[in-house]
Image: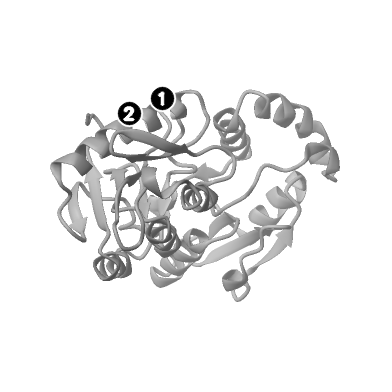
């Protein structure tokens, strides 16, 4: 079985993908991106590459015998003027800059098509790791109240709208009031920002209120950049005083679901999966 090629950023997702591939006997070759090197991946076959070294990336995966490639992990948008591309990257860079000006979705779609044109099959993290896709229904923590379900509905609608505009994938709503929307800062920093809002409009750790909702952007390539919920997300939601987290079933990845359920129960936060067409 050809090893799985992983373009890896920070966080637990690329670690989960690598562990799953090794466990099923496929093996991996991990290219860790400079500036976004996840320490837990250091023991796997692979190397560190710059984000603009496209030729080096292709050559490394071909040499390792990879047929499938998975993008996984947190990578912030680079400062394009500071990139040092290789020869292949130089010819590719104008397309990258043009796509980036249209938004993250266009940029990720271009990356996927470029790897496919080189003969690689792009697979999603849920396919590579297995059992990561969120299920529908109440998964852990207290049962959401009718008022909290209404907050989830509103947040799901807002998240779909900001996703349609390629802004972000997450929203926080409390008692019908939109507190935060996710942009380039990412979920963790959005949760931190929520925790700094006046207490009269948000929950606290002793009086939890409000929900975080994450869902994919409409029309995005679901093989790349599905919303991810891990223990750090739970911790951030708890610190922000939220009552729970909602997510689109089949459209979000739950990292180490067993631990997530246990921690949600301990923190008294609910986890709730809603259907793609709801509300």
Which quadrant would residue 262 be assigned to in this image?
bottom left
Figure disc tally: 2
Residue 76 seen in the current view = yes
SS at mark 2 in the image: helix
Residue behind mark 1: 161
Q: Residue at x 42, y 70 (%)?
A: 25
As drawn, 161 above or below 260: above
Q: Nearer the viewer, residue 28 or 163?
A: 163
**Image location of residue 65, percent across then percent down:** 60, 58
User: Residue at position x 58%, y 28% from top?
Assistant: 106
The answer to whether residue 169 is left or right of residue 82 is: left
Crowdedness near tag 2: few (<14), some (14–19) or many (≥20) residues, C-alpha within 10 Å: some
Can see residue 69? Answer: no
- How many residues crowd mark 1 within 10 Å: few (<14), some (14–19), many (20+)? some
Q: Is residue 207 above or below residue 185?
A: below
Left or right: where 195 falls relative to 76:
left
Q: Which residue lies at the image location 49% right of the left edge and 63% below the top edge?
A: 12
Residue most toward the front?
Answer: 200
Q: Secondary structure at mark 1?
A: helix
* x, y percent for residue 111: 61, 37
Q: Which residue is mark 2?
A: 157
Q: Are marks 2 and 1 in contact (CB under 8 Å)?
A: yes
The answer to which image quadrant residue 60 occupies is bottom right
Q: Position of residue 148 (x, y in %)?
A: 22, 43
**Marks 2/1: CA distance?**
6 Å
Can you tell which mark lies on residue 147? none
Relative to 48, 27 lies left or right: left
């Amino acid at each position: 079985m050809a090893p799985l090629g992983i373009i890896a950023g920070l966080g637990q997702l690329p670690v989960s993908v690598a562990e799953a591939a090794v466990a099923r006997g496929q093996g991996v070759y991990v290219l860790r991106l400079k500036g976004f090197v996840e320490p837990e991946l250091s023991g796997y076959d692979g190397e560190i590459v710059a984000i603009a070294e496209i030729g080096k990336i292709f050559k490394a995966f071909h040499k390792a015998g990879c047929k499938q490639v998975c993008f996984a992990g947190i990578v912030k948008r680079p400062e394009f003027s500071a990139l040092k591309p290789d020869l292949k990257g130089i010819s590719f860079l104008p397309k990258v800059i043009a796509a980036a000006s249209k938004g993250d979705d266009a940029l990720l779609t271009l990356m996927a098509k470029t790897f496919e044109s080189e003969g690689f099959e792009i697979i999603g993290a849920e396919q590579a790791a297995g059992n990561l896709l969120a299920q529908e229904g109440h998964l852990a923590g207290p049962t959401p109240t009718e008022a909290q379900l209404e907050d989830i509905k509103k947040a799901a609608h807002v998240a779909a709208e900001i996703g349609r505009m390629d802004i972000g994938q997450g929203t926080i709503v409390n008692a019908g009031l939109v507190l935060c929307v996710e942009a380039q800062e990412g979920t963790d920093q959005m949760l931190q920002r929520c925790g700094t809002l006046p207490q009269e409009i948000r929950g606290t750790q002793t009086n939890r209120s409000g929900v975080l909702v994450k869902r994919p952007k409409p029309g995005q390539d679901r093989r790349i950049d599905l919303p991810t919920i891990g223990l750090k997300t739970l911790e951030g939601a708890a610190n922000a005083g939220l009552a729970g987290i909602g997510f689109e079933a089949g459209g979000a990845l739950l990292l180490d679901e067993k631990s997530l359920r246990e921690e949600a129960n301990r923190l008294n936060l609910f986890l709730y999966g809603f259907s793609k067409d709801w509300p």
